[in-house]
Image (tube, grey):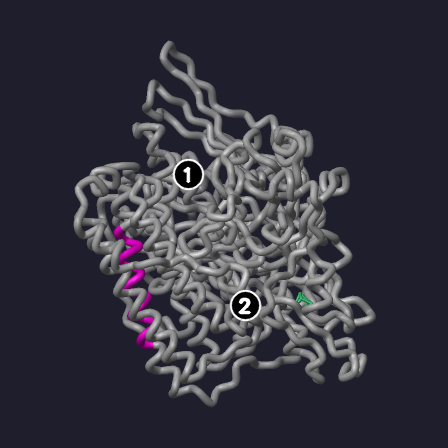
Amino acid sequence: MFDTLKSRIYQGDQAIPDIEKAVIDEKFRGLPLIDRQSCSNCNECIDVCPTNAINQDISIDMGKCIFCGDCERKCPNNAIKFTNFHKISSTSRESLIIDSNTTQESFESIAVKSTKEIKKLFGKSLKLRQVSAGGCNGCEMELNACSNVNFDMGRFGIDITASPRHADGLIITGPVMENMAKALEDAYLSVPDPKIIILTGTCAISGGVFQKSDVLKRDFLEKYKVDLYIPGCPVHPLTVINGILDFLK
Amino acid sequence: MKWIISKNNQVISLNEIPVLGIDELRNEIIKQYKTDKRVVGFFGCAEYSNVRLYTILADDNKSELLISSVRFMAGEKSYPSITKDISAFQMFEREFYEEFGIEPVGHPWLKPVRYSKNRFDKTQKIENYPFFKMDGEEVHEVAVGPIHAGVIEPGHFRFMCNGEKVYHLEIQLGYQHRGTESLFENNNNFAPHLAESIAGDTVIGHAITYSNAVEALLNIKISDKAELIRVLALELERIAVHIGDLGAISNDIGYLMGNSVFGATRTLVINTLLSICGSRFGRGLIRVGGVAFDIDIELSEKISKTLDKVLKDVDKMTETMFSSASVLSRLEKTGTLSMEKAKMIGLVGIATRASGLSLDARADHSWGWYKKFSFDKEILESGDVFARTHIRYKEIKQSMNIIKELLNQIQDCKEDILLVKSKNQLLGNSMVVSMVEGWRGEAVHTALTNNEGQIFRYKIKDPSFNNWYGLALAVRNNGISDFPLCNKSFNLSYCGNDL
Ligand code: SF4
């Protein structure tokens, strides 16, 4: 008992005090910036990309990108640079496409559009049911980390519930394939209205490295409106928490 | 010749692999099992209208792999089951049957494994899994999943209980099936991104297994430094997950102090991976030909310092935890799996070492830097949740020592290049088996190439494939409320099984 107390005192306070200002190690690959001026159109980045995230005009789709960094390394002209800026969530799928005009500020100004209604409904408390539909356990581990002593998402009134009946929406990971399609929809239908859908991780947003798999079954995502996209492979807890906080603002 | 003898990461020609009759192979397997060989591969390959069944046995004492095969002609639709004699084949035979429809006659429970997209019988649907039933007055069933209460992957558990006691647990998986193996086929981009997502908790383990296999087929040798960084990363992954598991086990017994402290300590370890390669799980680090990121003096000092702190915290917390009677009473004699059973069902990894079996591919089938260590496996005997918890603590310390050793040596190869570039093609008409002991156990990848040097079959075996059945046996005769704890002590991968 006393030993346990001693450990508690030794550990001190582990929580990150200001989540919104927290910075990740500079090695982290977050928002990419593209310098079209230095680009020599060699297309090496397009060829090396495992998920076809780079378009012909050298814009990068963060909904497809797994942030592997291969294009940055491959580029002979340093035209692609992944910054450690981690607030890369967005309420619209299109804003995830980064072109040479995008700056951190311009991205921030369009990425997460909050509405009065969402704020009124969920601003003080948001309970989510998590469904993994083919998630590799990477995003799942990071979602669990959101509730650990460091990130402590619960202090903002955001929690994961055990039952969809107690939830305000679903937070989905994984590319969504045939064998989970039904369970996913069942879970969604079990959530009372009004409800939201959050897609977490590149697999959920676009299929990621599994986008060519022939067992994908993503009709669910076409049928229902997605409210928030949180990119990453896996998502970083700070991306998740800040994404949701901005969405509820 | 009944078998061709190979080794971890050694390329052999497909023509050299003997083709036996099924009865002959069956007898041979039974014979080899008497001298301690065990199955690490048993899978089919379509060959025009025939099916070739490959069998790979590991000889852990001699660090060898025995490989043989059988050819089933188009009309041959059954053979006498091997599982009847060797239980460890039960999953392998079910998988082979599910994919090719060639029935192992006499298999005790020929049930679907994962409802894979290339199953021979598409009328089988995941919603209609044929569960066992139990009759009796006080018997009841509890169905859990596929979606669970926590943030974890989906799978279905069906408990048959008498009161609180579990008679039998049936685990039905397949919800995570993503068609992973076939995405490796005819894909010569040689990028381990996909391997990194086989099981997201074993990013480095599977990425190295894949890269070792491809490098063998490309006939390239990576630099000493790249080899060193790979082993270092693999051991960091082991430390991170083991610490995380100590926290999760604490949580499941309501020891919240352990949960918080181990959780925070794990953060330090994964953030170390982040400072090496930009990802908390080591994504982007392992590439075919070596590694993509360097560890310079400054970083190696930082790693060393962080690990000192981590070790101190883990030591402190574990000592406190293991000296608490209320903790021990929850861990000891819960979910026991005896050595005999572990051996019988072919359990691998930490779970098997916690049940007293000496099995660790780092020592038994060593590669790269592991060849340069004298390596003592950590082995415990009680086979209960406590042993599976304690072994994690021991392995954390062991991995710390390995990393310390590596950091001492990294300066000696600081001039080495990180990535070897090669224009080589994959060796055609060949097979290579690659084994890596990840934190959970051995990952085994087998790649087969055709005449054009294209991978036409890529077989993956995550340790979870062996161990799910171990969990089912371990919870028998335990209270159903101890299931989460038993489950955590195994911590198996759903998608590693479902592929
Ligand atoms: S970092 Fe993103 S865009 Fe660049 S190669 Fe990797 S997946 Fe493609």
Q: Judging from the image, what secondary structure is the residue with disc 1 in? A: helix
The structure residue drawn at horizontal position 67% and vertical position 52%, both measured from the top left corner, is A229
Q: From the Cβ of disc 1, is ligand 1 less than 8 Å away? A: no
Task: Work out how far the residue at label 1 is from the one at label 2, CA to CA, in angstroms.
Answer: 29 Å
- Chain letter behind tag 2: B
Residue B443 in the image: x percent, y percent? Answer: 46, 56
**Is residue B58 left or right of A96 when viewed as pictured?**
left
**Ligand 1: quadrant of the figure:** bottom right
**Is residue A151 left or right of B429 when viewed as pictured?**
left
Between A138 and B427, the one nearer to me in the picture: A138
The structure residue drawn at horizontal position 39% and vertical position 40%, both measured from the top left corner, is B487
Q: From the Cβ of disc 2, is ligand 1 less than 8 Å away? A: no
Residue ranking furthest to the bottom: B415
Residue ranking furthest to the top: B137
Pick whichever of labels 1 and 2 is earlier in the sequence: 2
**Is residue B264 left or right of A44 when viewed as pictured?**
left
Does residue A210 appear in this view? Answer: yes
When asked about the image quadrant of residue A49, the answer is bottom right
- Chain letter behind tag 1: B
Q: Judging from the image, what secondary structure is the residue with disc 2 in? A: helix
| Residue identifier under label 1 | B469
| Residue identifier under label 2 | B211
Mark 1 belongs to which amino acid?
Tyr
Residue count near mark 2 (Cα–Cα under 10 Å), binned few <14, some 14–19, many ≥20: many
Q: Dominant secondary structure of the magenta stretch? A: helix
What residue span does the magenta drawing correspond to? B390-405
Mark 2 belongs to which amino acid?
Ser
The structure residue drawn at horizontal position 32% and vertical position 66%, both measured from the top left corner, is B399
Residue A71 in the image: x percent, y percent? Answer: 67, 73
**In the picture shown, does residue B194 fall above or below A85?**
above
